[in-house]
Amino acid sequence: MPLLAPSSEDTRVYEITVLYPASISQKEEQQVLKEIEELLKEADAKLMEKDTWGKRGLAYNIGGHSEGNYAVFYYDMDPSKLKEVDEALRIIPNVLRHLIVKPPKGYQVVKFSEEYERWLKTRETDAERKRREKEEALQKRVADKAKRQVKRATEQKKDIVEKITPIEEEKLTQELEKIISDDEITL
């Protein structure tokens, strides 16, 4: 992520956030962004970074709009031209609100649009999380039941082996040998 630092002692880095209606056409949107960039270029500001957030819902209606698009610009410019830029942003058509702040020293730009896209790909909805947790619980119950069945079967074998006495074992062996050696068996 780029570290923001002014290009000279006479300039400062400013973060300029602009809100414009989501309902305007793509051509009008490009026109608004172009006007903002031209205004800042006239103020001898140098663009460092630009981050468009896209459409977001608003907490309350602004100018009859319940949704708006956000664009965040990072400019290196002379502080004496800040008031001029602020006043010019107020009169640009389709700019609902704007905010200019000076980021703290050592501030690193984190592009919201990239982070949001990454989050969308990796997020897990509540329904997916509940389904996954339910599947994990079911798998655990099945595994526990299988362990109990194996333990029970092992104990039953042990009981059967203990019940057979050595005499019965010899008798069983003799009977098997008799059956195996019996010539009367026809297949």
Image (cartoon, rainbow, N blue to C red):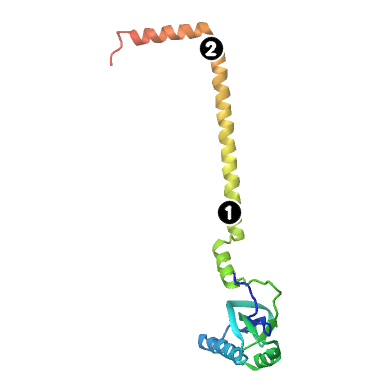
The count of marks equals 2
Name the residue tied to disc 2.
164
Near mark 1 (Cα within 10 A), the count class, few <14, some 14-19 or many ≥20, is few
Q: Helix, strand, or loop for circle 1? A: helix
168 or 30, which lies in front?
Answer: 30
The quadrant in which the C terminus is found is top left
| Residue 21, visible in the rendered structure | no
CA separation in Å, label 1 and label 2? 50 Å
Near mark 2 (Cα within 10 A), the count class, few <14, some 14-19 or many ≥20, is few
Is residue 78 shown left or right of residue 132? right
| Residue 156, visible in the rendered structure | yes
Residue drawn at 33 percent across, 8 percent down: 182
The quadrant in which the N terminus is found is bottom right
| Residue type (three-letter) at the residue carrying disc 1 | Arg
Residue 77 - label: none
In the figure, residue 74 lies in which quadrant? bottom right
Residue 106 percent location from the top left of the image = 68, 71
Q: Helix, strand, or loop for circle 2? A: loop
Q: Residue furthest left?
A: 187
Name the residue tied to disc 1.
131
Which sits earlier in the primary sequence, circle 1 or circle 2?
1
Residue 71 percent location from the top left of the image = 60, 80
Residue 55 percent location from the top left of the image = 59, 78
Q: Is residue 182 above or below residue 119?
A: above
Residue drawn at 37 percent across, 7 percent down: 178
Residue drawn at 63 percent across, 91 percent down: 43
Residue drawn at 40 percent across, 10 percent down: 176
119 or 179, which lies in front?
Answer: 119
121 or 39, which lies in front?
Answer: 39
